[in-house]
Amino acid sequence: MFLLLIFLVAVLPVNTEGEKIIDGVEAKPHSRPYMAYLQIITDNGLLDSCGGFLITRQFVMTAAHCKGREITVTLGAHDVSKRESTQQKIKVENQIVHPKYNFQSKLHDIMLLKLENKAELTPAVDVIPLPGPSDFMKPRKMCWAAGWGRTGVNKPLSDTLREVKLRTMYKETCKYYPNYNYSLQLCVGSPSTLKSVYKGDSGGPLVCAGVAHGIVSYGGLHAKPPAVFTRISSYVYWIKTVLKGK
Ligand SMILES: *[C@@H]1O[C@H](CO)[C@@H](O)[C@H](O)[C@H]1NC(C)=O
């Protein structure tokens, strides 16, 4: 398994200085209390990391391709290199991958992590609401993505949580991804007008008006936007089944 990172490059449209790439910004500490940092031991015994988000006290949502031999979730973190008093580290008891997840097509890239213990809700740890089955996110909406991913192609992972504002796109913008499916996925990030750089861990949320609508799934070659996110509203019934314990 490998970590898929999204890297959205923005290019100033025909400008004097040439291309200017701006990093996303550091999030205000604990302003996104649903964010989860996933430390993964892969099936090959390597260390990896992903993002995720708390949806109930016992479940974290992430991408299916983040599955590993063992996962530990850190909630309430801002700087994951530090031991912050707000942090809650909880082992994952069960990794529930969507039954139709396909490694090749990357469709149905959604997984639920059942925590060994319920998270304690605090000002730094909280759940985020999910959309209803008919809350189909439309194009041209402004949303936010957040993660501890790289801040540049050759940069290391970020210790602190970073965030970036991204626009949802029409399906045509993602049509060069051969397996892109508009009813199951969101196309996110303008290839031409976005003026920021973002590289965030897979599995993190796309948050639109306080609701988690997407999960970071994959991006283009050389990290060029747009990127593809799993469309959460298409999976509401499966999620409910898993949360009820089947
Ligand atoms: C997208 O996925 C849905 C649900 O699985 C399916 O019904 C539809 O045919 C797919 N669309 C395309 C263009 O493949």
Image (cartoon, rainbow, N blue to C red):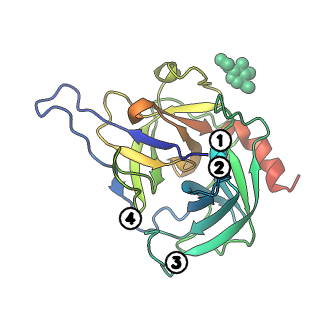
Residue that extends furthest to the right in the rendered view of this protein = 246
Which residue is labeled 1 in the image? Answer: 232
Assess disc 3: are there few (<14), some (14-19) or many (≥20) residues with their C-alpha within 10 Å of its C-alpha. some
Which residue is labeled 4 in the image? Answer: 28
Q: Quadrant of ligand 1?
A: top right
Circle nearer the N terminus (1, 3) = 3
Please provide percent x and percent y for residue 148.
45, 57
Q: Nearer the viewer, residue 225 or 125?
A: 225
Mark carried by residue 130? 2
Residue type at mark 1? Ile
Mark carried by residue 174? none
Please provide percent x and percent y for residue 223.
41, 36
Circle nearer the N terminus (3, 2) = 3
Assess disc 4: are there few (<14), some (14-19) or many (≥20) residues with their C-alpha within 10 Å of its C-alpha. few
Cα–Cα gap, marks 2 and 4: 22 Å
Assess disc 2: are there few (<14), some (14-19) or many (≥20) residues with their C-alpha within 10 Å of its C-alpha. some
Residue type at mark 4? Lys
